[in-house]
Amino acid sequence: MKQTQLLKGVLDGCVLAIIADHEIYGYELIQALRADGFDSIVGGTLYPLLAKLENRGDLIGQFKASPDGPQRKYYAITPQGLQTLTTFNHQWFQLKAHVDHILTRRTPS
C-alpha cells in the first residue's frame, strides 16, 4: 500500500485539527504539516482538500491583506467542522486501537 493511500484517509482530520487551533492560510498550513512530519505535502494536494472542506461547510475562507504582497486566503473552522473533527478523532482512535492490537499480537519480535 502506498503512503499516499494512507494519507488520504487521515489528511482531512489533520488539517481540521491544525485549523481548529487558529485560522491559517494555505502555505502556512503546508509548513505546519511538514513540521509535523508530512514532508510530501504540496499545494496540489492541499488546495483541493481545502476547497472540498470549505464546500462541505467544515471551513470558511476569507481573504485578508498580507504585509508581504497579495491578499492571502485564511481558513477558519466552522461549528460543523468542529463536529467533523470530533467524529474523525473518535473514529481514528478506535481504528488505531484495532490496528495496534493486531500489529502487536502478530508482528514477530
Image: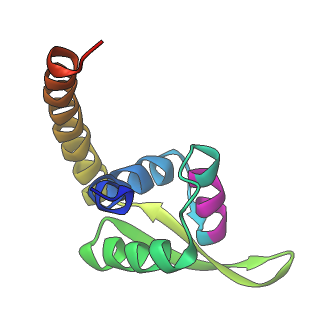
**Does the magenta portion include 29?**
yes
Q: Which residue extends farthest bottom?
A: 70
Q: Is residue 14 left or right of residue 67?
A: left
Position of residue 107 relative to residue 86, above or below, is above
Check the picture and name the quadrant holding the C terminus.
Answer: top left
- Give the image location of residue 9, x and y in percent: 26, 56
Residue range highlighted in magenta: 27-33
Q: Quadrant of residue 12?
A: bottom left
Compare residues 2 and 87 and report the one nearer the observer.
2
Q: Nearer the viewer, residue 53 or 36?
A: 36
Residue nearer the viewer, 7 or 57: 7
Q: Residue at position x 13%, y 27% from top? A: 98
Residue drawn at (41%, 50%) of the image: 14
Image mark count = 0
Residue 3, percent across and down? 37, 56
Spot occupied by residue 93 in the image (x, y as percentages of width and height): 23, 31
Q: Residue at x 32, y 52 (%)?
A: 10
